[in-house]
């Protein structure tokens, strides 16, 4: 055979498979993976991607990309965006940016699904509870009115021929004690409870204690056993000088998590504050009663100093003696 070089002829690929345009990019490694044919083709405008090594593949059509995006969106949870916003809020909170954290937690709350099939909003829960409490107050007023009327009827009656009827009415009233509001469930209640409790934490730092209490209320309606919400509401109550409710929340937190050291310390500290408050209230009440008693006895030339109360250590009862001359012992 004759010596080299030899000449070989390769027929070009059909136009429907490879399309070259002025926008196609090349480099030393071969075809750019992002290079696409943008001109119209015979197969409906589908572009071509030239791959390293000379491979050829079709660019997905706009309809195909739209379908894939919609399928990915279907796979996302309705709460996924809220979770992303919560994490942004957590990052801002850790950085000390409490206003920005508040905004992110609010957005997380707002993007959650509500309504039929999911559940009520936080504002709707607060309104439901307010309406329930108002109805309960009216019901208890009516119960007390009926009980008072029943007592008057018994006192004025010379005999009790309808004793069984009266007792039945009493039983009905006893069974109709104060009721507790039971909020409707939300499909994502536990997660929403976290968003509200986290926002309450930012409100504590911002000094907006009333709003913090409302957020904790909603959080606990969504998840009644959420200890963090109890402790944050406990803090808000204490900062508004409501040690009675603060102590209740601290005790409830210990009941739910006996090993929670923060809750236990709060119980010890708040119990002392509450005892001091009650003792002070007792002294103020006794002082007011003493002033009232002296104002009445003064019409007779007497005062409470004319009376001595001595407690019996055995029975715990008191014996009262009259002293005509209280100045003379």
Image: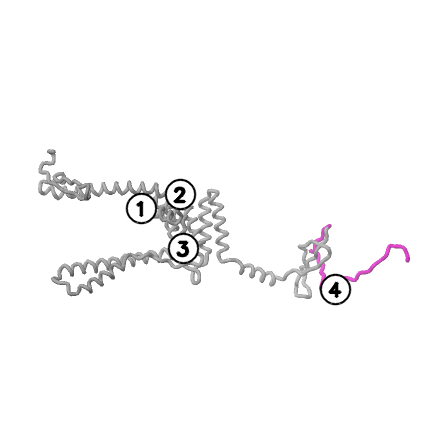
In terms of image quadrants, where is residue 262?
top left
Dot 3, how many residues are within 10 Å of its Cα: few (below 14), some (14-19), or many (20+)?
Answer: many
The image position of residue 127, as x and y in percent, is: 35, 57
| Cα distance in 3D space between marks 4 and 2 | 77 Å
Dot 4, how many residues are within 10 Å of its Cα: few (below 14), some (14-19), or many (20+)?
Answer: few
Q: Residue at x 56, y 59 (%)?
A: 72
Q: Residue at x 71, y 60 (%)?
A: 19
Hey, which residue is sitting farthest front in the picture?
314
Which of the marked residues, 1 or 2, is nearer the chain's N terminus? 1
Q: Secondary structure at mark 2?
A: helix
Which residue position holds label 3? 222
Q: Is residue 14 left or right of residue 205?
A: right
- In this rendering, the answer to whether 250 lies above or below 139 is above
Dot 1, how many residues are within 10 Å of its Cα: few (below 14), some (14-19), or many (20+)?
Answer: some
- In this rendering, the answer to whether 138 lies above or below 262 is below
The image position of residue 292, as x and y in percent, is: 16, 43
Highlighted range, magenta: 1-28
Which residue position holds label 4? 14
Which residue position holds label 2? 262
The image position of residue 198, as x and y in percent, is: 43, 48
Q: Is residue 252 left or right of residue 36?
A: left
User: Is 4 in front, or is 308?
Assistant: 308
Q: Secondary structure at mark 3?
A: helix
Dot 2, how many residues are within 10 Å of its Cα: few (below 14), some (14-19), or many (20+)?
Answer: few
- Cβ atoms under marks 1 and 3 closer than 8 Å: no
Which residue position holds label 1? 244
Location of the N terminus by quadrant is bottom right
Q: Residue at x 39, y 59 (%)?
A: 184
């Amino acid at each position: 055979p004759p010596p080299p070089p030899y000449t070989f002829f390769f027929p070009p690929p059909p136009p429907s498979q490879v399309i070259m345009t002025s926008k196609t990019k090349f480099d030393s490694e071969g075809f750019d993976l992002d290079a696409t044919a943008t001109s119209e083709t015979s197969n409906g405008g589908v572009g071509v991607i030239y791959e390293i090594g000379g491979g050829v593949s079709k660019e997905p059509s706009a309809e195909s990309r739209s379908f894939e995006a919609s399928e990915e969106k279907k796979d996302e949870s309705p709460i996924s965006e809220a979770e992303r916003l919560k994490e942004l809020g957590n990052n801002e909170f850790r950085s000390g940016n409490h206003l920005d954290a508040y905004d992110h937690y609010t957005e997380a709350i707002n993007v959650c699904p509500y309504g039929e099939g999911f559940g009520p909003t936080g504002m709707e829960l607060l309104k439901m509870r307010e309406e329930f409490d108002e109805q309960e107050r009216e019901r208890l007023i009516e119960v007390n009115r009926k009980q008072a009327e029943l007592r008057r009827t018994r006192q004025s009656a010379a005999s009790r021929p309808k004793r069984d009827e009266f007792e039945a009415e009493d039983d009905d009233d006893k069974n109709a004690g104060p009721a507790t509001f039971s909020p409707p469930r939300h499909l994502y209640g536990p997660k929403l409870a976290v968003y509200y409790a986290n926002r309450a934490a930012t409100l504590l730092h911002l000094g907006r204690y009333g709003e913090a209490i409302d957020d904790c209320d909603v959080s606990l309606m969504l998840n009644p056993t959420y200890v963090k919400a109890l402790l944050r509401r406990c803090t808000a109550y204490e900062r508004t000088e409501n040690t009675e409710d603060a102590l209740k929340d601290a005790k409830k937190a210990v009941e739910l998590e006996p090993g929670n050291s923060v809750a236990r310390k709060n119980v010890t500290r708040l119990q002392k504050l509450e005892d001091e408050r009650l003792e002070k209230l007792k002294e103020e009440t006794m002082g007011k009663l003493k002033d009232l008693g002296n104002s009445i006895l003064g019409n007779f030339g007497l005062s409470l100093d004319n009376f001595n109360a001595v407690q019996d250590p055995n029975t715990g009862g008191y014996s009262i003696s009259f002293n005509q001359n209280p100045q003379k012992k």
